[in-house]
Amino acid sequence: MEIAVLRYGHRDIRDYRVTTHCCLVSRALGASKIIVEGNEDQNIRKSVEGVTKNWGSGFEIEFTDSWRKTITEYKKKKFFVMHLTMYGLPLQKQIRRMRKNKKILVIIGSQKVTAEVYQKADQNISVTQQPHSEIAALAIALDWLQKGKELEKKFKNPKIKIIPQEKGKKVMKK
């Protein structure tokens, strides 16, 4: 399954930390790229590229000034567009439908999401109908989509690798 994430409405001054975490979660949990809509933030680009350089490649970051154009482009590439929102249908009741797709574009918001996003999405999905973080929703959705297999993903050419320990820390550096 190929998964891309669209971060809707990034505002560089307000959203830097949360958007960076959305990027890191996307990468760590199996997405191949994130597209950030809004202000092009070179600090986020630098952070993500630094992580991929040190911890292993296989993830891209792009910026766009048009979420509409991005959704249209991905639909033309046969991506199923899944919008994560607490107003959507429950993930646990829709997951089988989601997994049938070979390519998925997951949309996560930053600022208030326009009604047009809800209309353009193939499916509006919630992980809960309670207020929560887009980072948590993204992590849960990526995990459920991939049945936990993303947790065993190997990254190409890492310079830094953690050696799992019951206690303490062990890091291998190339």
Image (spheres, helix red, strand yellow):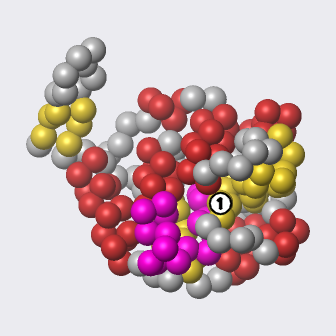
Regarding mark 1 in the picture, which secondary structure is present there?
strand
Which residue is pictured at 20% across the width and 42% down the height? 160
In the displayed image of the protein, which residue is found farthest to the top? 166
Which residue is pictured at 55% across the width and 68% down the height? 35
* Residue 129 part of the magenta-drawn span: no
Point out residue 33 in the picture as x, y percentages from the top left corner.
51, 59
Which residue is pictured at 65% across the width and 60% down the height? 108
Point out residue 22 in the picture as x, y percentages from the top left corner.
50, 56
Looking at the image, residue 85 lies above or below residue 151: below
Let me know if residue 29 appears in the view: yes
Rate crowding at label 1 as few (under 14), some (14 to 19) or many (20 or more) other CA atoms within 10 Å.
many
The amino acid sitting under disc 1 is: Ile
Instruction: Name the side, left or right, on which 143 lies relative to 17.
Output: right
Q: What residue did someone put label 1 on?
A: 108
Point out residue 66 in the picture as x, y percentages from the top left corner.
65, 83
Classify residue 147 by image quadrant. Answer: top right
Looking at the image, residue 173 lies above or below residue 35: above
Classify residue 105 by image quadrant. Answer: bottom right
Q: Quadrant of the N terminus?
A: top right
User: What range is drawn magenta here?
Assistant: 3-19
Point out residue 49 in the picture as x, y percentages from the top left corner.
32, 63
Classify residue 140 by image quadrant. Answer: top right
Let me know if residue 63 appears in the view: no
